[in-house]
Image: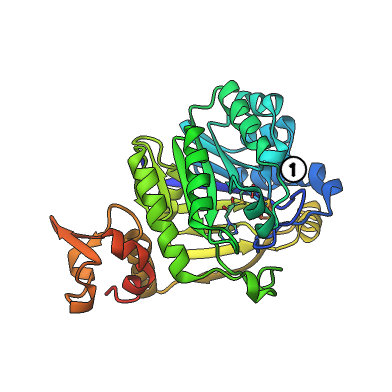
Amino acid sequence: MQRPSFGTYVHVPFCLARCHYCAFATWDDRPHLIDGYARAVVIEVGRAVEAGLPEAGTAFFGGGTPSLLDPAQLGAIVAALPLAVGAEVSVECNPDTVDLDLLTGYREAGVTRISLGVQSMVPHVLAALGRTHDPANVDTAVAAIRGAGFDTWNIDLIYGAVGESLDDWSTTLAAALALDPPHVSAYGLTVEAGTPLADDPARHPDDDDEADKYLLAEAALAGAGRTSYEVSNWARPGHECRHNLLYWGQGDYRGFGCAAHSHEAGRRWWNVRTPERYLALVAAGEATMAADEVLDLEDRRIEGLQLALRTSGGVPDASVPDDDDLVGLVERSDGRATLTLAGRLLANEVAVRLR
Ligand SMILES: C[S@@+](CC[C@H](N)C(=O)[O-])C[C@H]1O[C@@H](n2cnc3c(N)ncnc32)[C@H](O)[C@@H]1O
Ligand code: SF4
């Protein structure tokens, strides 16, 4: 697995509609800002380049829905970023917003990897999540990914919506695998404060149900040759997301756009949250940062272990205590400790015991 030494992130804070579970910094009522926003990001990147922005091995366009940018808008940002030869350039896409022309344009602009937000292939589950896309659009989107010539791409799935049976989840897994994605991310539905889901306890997920669905995901995905390389991520060998490997390895990255986070050598900072505020600061030639923090060395060390624990590489053996209640949750060999399948279900409980 290739882990780059430096990455870039571009936040795109626009969506066609807001899903009921989502707390990301994104707005569904500001399409008029998109063009000016893409130009502002180019300006912010240009200023960082002048100040010595290093060459990056990855660029990740996240959101929001980056696929609301047309190829010219997205391509201008890619062209402004200093990227190493062979860099991974990923774009998160919503199935309702992609077609062959758009993805062909992205490919020509230097995009190498597509991540598609599918979530479920069962209509009543999509409705329970407050998703607006038609499952038929997923087939069209995947045909466009293939037609445009992308050979590495991902499908995002969510399990645990109210009313989703184990059969529904198996249907989603089978339908997703039938599309033959090289990479699958499967997330347990999380209740995020401030979302319509948070306000509706009747729709909150159940831990035991999510654990059963995690086991189904592992069986289906591993059975189909996608290996778990992080608790929520499975890939064919060679199709791991290098940008995520950088995050999990506590690497350095620079974020552009509103609400984007950056990390360099133990210092973290983040930009102002709204697109309006961001646009005003860029236009005024002022810094876009909202605040920063410096992690103390011990906090940084523990955070590094917690991130690494979730990956297939695990952590140094000595960092997991030899306690009876951790038996069966970690496997120890060659000086490393890695989570077992039972341990992956209880990753947070193991993480708080790292030393
Ligand atoms: C920025 S979105 C991906 C692209 C696009 N916006 C879309 O949703 O189609 C990132 C992913 O985070 C996951 N996600 C967001 N909020 C979540 C939550 N509350 N619980 C679980 N997964 C979540 C979803 O799988 C989603 O696809
Ligand atoms: S999950 Fe994706 S499409 Fe839905 S609101 Fe969040 S960012 Fe937008």
Q: Quadrant of the C terminus?
A: bottom left
**SS at mark 1?**
helix
Whether residue 304 sits left or right of residue 124 in the image: it is: left
Report the residue at 48% width, 52% height from top.
186
Residue 23, how many percent across, how many down? Answer: 65, 64
Whether residue 249 appears in this view of the structure is no
Total tally of numbered discs in the picture:
1
Report the residue at 60% width, 26% height from top.
143
Work out whether residue 279 or residue 121 is closer to the camera in this orientation and state it: 121
Q: Quadrant of the N terminus?
A: top left
Work out whether residue 54 or residue 279 is closer to the camera in this orientation and state it: 279
Residue 288, how many percent across, how many down? Answer: 69, 59
Whether residue 37 sits left or right of residue 237 in the image: it is: right
Q: Which residue is label 1 attached to?
A: 38
Mark 1: few/some/many CA within 10 Å (<14, 14-19, 20+): many
Q: Classify mark 1 as within 8 Å of ligand 1 or not, answering yes or no.
A: no
Whether residue 298 appears in this view of the structure is yes
Residue 191, how many percent across, how many down? Answer: 59, 69
Amino acid type, label 1: Ala
Q: Is residue 323 above or below residue 139?
A: below
Report the residue at 34% width, 36% height from top.
237
